[in-house]
Image (tube, helix red, strand yellow):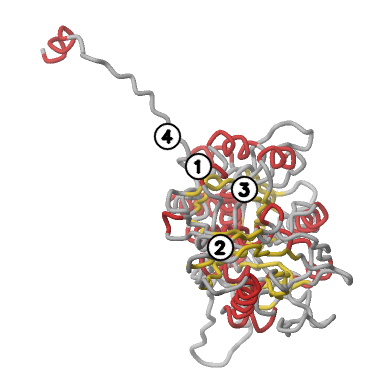
Amino acid sequence: MPISFDNIPQNWRMPLYWVEVDPSMAGLPIVRNPALLVGSMIPATPPPPTGVVAGIGVPNVPIPIGTQAQADHYFGQGSEIGCMVQAFLANNFAQEMWCLPVTTPVGAVAAHGDITFTSPATEAGMLNVYIAGHLVAIVVGTTDTTANIATNLAAAINNNDALPVYAVATTNKCTITCKTPGVNGNDISVWLNYYGAIGGQELPPGLVVTLPANNMLSGGAGIPDYTAGIAALGEQQFEYVALANTDSNTLFMWEQEYGFGDTGRWGWMRQLYGHLFAAKRDTYSNLIIWGATQNSGVLSVMAVEPNAPSPTYEWACAYTAKAARALTNDPARPLQTLTLDSILPAKGNDRFNLPELNSLSGAGIATQQASLTNVSHIMRETTTYQLNLYGQSDDAYELVTTLATLAKLIRNQRQVITSKYPRYKLADDGTRFGVGQKIVTPKVITAELVAQYAIDEFNGLVENLQAFKDHLVVERDNQDPNRLNVLYPPDLVNQLRVFAVLAQFRLQYDRGQDLEIIN
């Protein structure tokens, strides 16, 4: 019996017509690639301050979230992770999104800052305060005292549940405090009149306002422990992960989870793959120094200027969302020019210039640049990988697209092999077996891999099919006759990232040359 059946027994004698359905030649890989947002929720214990509502979600347990209302319900309105969801949805509404809520340690301190009014307005106008990049505007009248203005501002802040802070007014001072305890509250900025006079935003004449030092909240302390949260992920696939924290311990734990070792998601046993995204606010010099301490192919950290209003955890989510949206469509296309919507960048001279951005990209830092309309876009999706195992310069994993493309290729190949050959026999090349027998030889698998590579080339993931065929090796293991070893050498397609032109102009071409060409 040359045809191999999986279910119909060889000794079945009952008449007449029996069909065994085999889907092995029909299936195609399914694109799912869920995203995971990792950040702090407003915990129920200890009880939050009056007016701040805790989330009902269970810390360290991932949960699918489809809307902002669900995020607010589970994590608390204005929580760190709730704001991350808002930034993600503004940039990617179609991705399957999960959240991993965590809490900061017992005794964590919430960041705070004072907005102080020392002189009332002499003319009526608007007070435009940007908190974490979100506008809070109130009317200021000529009869308003500094105490009235502080009270009105506090009321406006507390009426906006989506803000990451709550406010308390005392005399002429409005004190704002982060709803989520922890060090990330120190990344919440406070600015006046972001768009300036040309955008219709000016302080009313006479009004004098003092903001927190360096325009940032301060005093926040406490970093989540991600051990339990990472363990709770199990073997569930999360392709694009947005991290709120970039401290050394946090990055180490997540890089281990997504690394290339035996227990990592990019390792040979788990084969889950995925990418980590984050953002870091600092000066150019400090970012260059920090970049030299990082070296991971699975992590991309975007540089954020010190005076950018939006907090880094929202930058991280906007970056993750746009990367997920683009890489799901085509993992090999560059991310340059994709906009980071809902994010307020630094203004004017506070932005990194092109030479600084170029140096940052060479130091393992992803870069962004704002347009004249104050919309940031991705410049280069650099990972932190810079050195090989011997500490020598290496660009193998420099760009996010490299591993994204490789993951797509491996999954395509795995789908073909596991679907078509789940229960096959293995024989040497040249074995004469009947048509329909479920037997493979090295040449059969070679042909399969070449055919799949041709499909991947047609889909724009790889190039140089002939070179691939020349370098592909498929052989039986000389110590285990049941094992097939493959050397798989794909040539990943590259991206158009630099278009260099030498403009060799002339004031006038030599007329003799012109006549010679015509003749």
Q: Position of residue 216 (x, y in %)?
A: 69, 57
The answer to whether 497 appears left or right of 190 in the picture is left
Rounded to the nearest whole Å, what is the CA distance between mark 4 and mark 3?
A: 27 Å
Rounded to the nearest whole Å, what is the CA distance between mark 3 and mark 1?
A: 30 Å
Q: Which residue is mark 3?
A: 305
Disc 3 marks which amino acid?
Glu
Residues at circles 2 and 4 in contact by the CB criterion of under 8 Å? no
* Residue at 48% over, 40% down: 497
Q: Earlier in the sequence, mark 4 or mark 3?
A: 3
**Above/below status of 371 relative to 513:** below
Residues at circles 2 and 1 in contact by the CB criterion of under 8 Å? no
Q: Earlier in the sequence, mark 4 or mark 1?
A: 1
Q: Position of residue 315 (x, y in %)?
A: 60, 58
* Residue at 58% over, 55% down: 432
- Label 2 element class: helix
Q: Which residue is mark 2?
A: 321
Q: Which residue is mark 1?
A: 494
Q: Quadrant of residue 438?
A: bottom right
